[in-house]
Amino acid sequence: MPNDGSVLIVGSVALDSLETPYGSAPDALGGSAVYASLACSLLAPVRLVGVVGSDYPAEGFELLRSRNIDLAGLQVVEGGRTFRWAGRYAGDLGAAETLSTDLNVFADFSPRLPPGHEATPYVFLANIQPSLQRQVLEQTTGPRLTMCDTMNLWLNTMPEQVGDMVGRVDIALMNDAEARQLTREPHLIAAAEKTLDLGARCVVVKKGEHGALVVTEAGCRFLPPFPTTRLVDTTGAGDTFAGGMIGHLARTGDLSTENLIRAAGIGAVLASITVEGLGVTALAHASLEEVQERYHVLGKCGHIPPLR
Amino acid sequence: MPNDGSVLIVGSVALDSLETPYGSAPDALGGSAVYASLACSLLAPVRLVGVVGSDYPAEGFELLRSRNIDLAGLQVVEGGRTFRWAGRYAGDLGAAETLSTDLNVFADFSPRLPPGHEATPYVFLANIQPSLQRQVLEQTTGPRLTMCDTMNLWLNTMPEQVGDMVGRVDIALMNDAEARQLTREPHLIAAAEKTLDLGARCVVVKKGEHGALVVTEAGCRFLPPFPTTRLVDTTGAGDTFAGGMIGHLARTGDLSTENLIRAAGIGAVLASITVEGLGVTALAHASLEEVQERYHVLGKCGHIPPLR
């Protein structure tokens, strides 16, 4: 396979029941691979790997296909039910309270890459069990760049496997609480540096309303949040960030530290679009032009003028 | 009085008993006016207004005088005891648990500006009761720039007076929880914008390890934290930030929005020095050169490269 700038994204494909102060939605399109793929597809060709049941709605397939997302790796289990998650947000939309999780077809998910997918140059292992992330990674042949996300569930139940995955990828994403939990280090920058010591080339700590911290051997860089105040639903913001980040890297082919910062900035502004709508609704209407405009605003928001 | 770039600082002068995971100190020099004055004095002449008892140690006077801080406004109550605060920090140094507060001479403090102090061009009302902040403000004659800080104690007990003070000054400082509490708005940027609506020209939200948010009519600006990992004691970090910010404004005389950002950056790097020592120990040894070097690093840490 040529280095065609494609991105392989493996993760959950879900139907989410969302309750927020600004609106509710039953069985909305969701899942880490869906948010990440929608974001990434604005920037680079996407190959999605996941599983759904035969109840997955036609609108889901249509939305993904409308963004030219390759669904050859999306298994459909006949007679099975799609993974469902229900969550509720309080006023600050900081963290969802999980009301229910029904793994359904996701419980027996064993990711298999279809022929031709193994050599995809960019690989994003979204939030699924670390052993499944590893299973996907082992099916790939020399990807140019790999990235993984994690979540507190796996840190609670299998911290060693999470640490192992962090050491196998180029870019490890986590949120601030997860970085602290993984390293048992309360100070965030120190926690990120200890995560880097596990083997990743770059650690990105997502901090929600506080932006993101990108740590490489060259040092720390802070990204402000995009200053939206139209906050509706933070579901999928981290997955969107990840999809945007790897999408920018695939689009540009530039893996320099400076371009990692740009990529994280693109992820941040895409996430700011996601949170302005319920579920994927705002993200589904995002355009590359809007993303680039927001990136420019982000740069201004973070600009510190030199002393005179 | 000429516009001589002096800064009037009113606030608490205290003896702090500190317990941190990295060391303890009984009766250490502390208080909002002391941290702010030490920081500010690196940049501009300071006139301190406060009160101590006759037990205030000689080393306190010496330290303040060594920085050329004008102590004409520091009342010494013969036979009185200096304000004392005892606090304990847990591992993340995020917020102190107050163990005891003995107001002592501070309980009857009625700030009076000595002759010549009324026309000081820059005025910082550090964390004291809002009615005392107002009492000082009413004794001044046409200051060029006024700034106030607050704390959750006054928001809990007299929120209207806090809101009133915010409307009387040019720059209102608070931390993130305080901005949310004052405006009853969970979203931080919206909370800062609502605080701006109360009448201040600029609202600075101090976010500790997440940096600071500066909001003016021109929009939002985010400052990253200076990436120190030598965190020892966060006491006085906010007061240091404030002293550095107004010190930079007084030193440069430039009140443009762009220079407000520089000033906040100077405050942020001075705060990063304070947290590296127990009490005022690190701040007491800071140099202007070190501050300027850290400012340069801060600018790099927040830099978002333009898209190509």
Image (spheres, coloured by chain):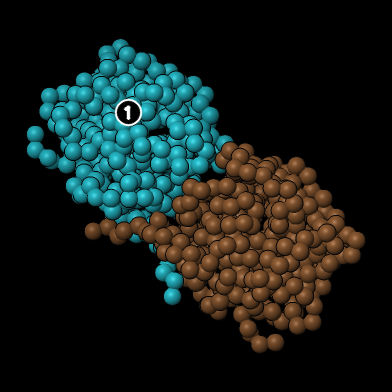
Chain colours: A brown, B cyan
Q: Is residue A119 above or below residue A152?
A: below
Taking the image as drawn, is residue A231 in sight? yes
Neighbourhood count class around disc 1 (C-alpha, 10 Å): few under 14, some 14–19, many 20 upward: many
* Residue in the picture at 34% in, 18% down: B106
Quarter of the image where one finds residue A165: bottom right
Q: Amino acid at mark 1?
A: Met
Q: Position of residue B94 (x, y in %)?
A: 52, 39
* Residue in the picture at 51% in, 35% down: B95
What residue is disc 1 on?
B165
* Residue in the picture at 69% in, 71% down: A65
Return the residue found at the far left: B1
Q: Quadrant of the N terminus of chain A?
A: bottom right
Quarter of the image where one finds residue B145: top left
Task: Decide if residue B296 is on the left or right side of residue A173.
Answer: left
- Marks counted in the figure total 1
Q: Position of residue B16 (x, y in %)?
A: 42, 28
Quarter of the image where one finds residue A148: bottom right
Return the residue found at the far top: B79
Q: Is residue B113 above or below residue A15?
A: above
Q: Chain of mark 1?
A: B
* Residue in the picture at 30% in, 60% down: A306
Q: Nearer the viewer, residue A273 or A12?
A: A273
Determine whether the residue tagged by mark 1 lies in a helix, strand or loop. helix
Q: Position of residue B280 (x, y in %)?
A: 38, 38
Q: Is residue B223 above or below residue A69?
A: above
Task: Decide if residue B22 is on the left or right side of residue B50.
Answer: right
Q: Nearer the viewer, residue B191 or A15?
A: A15
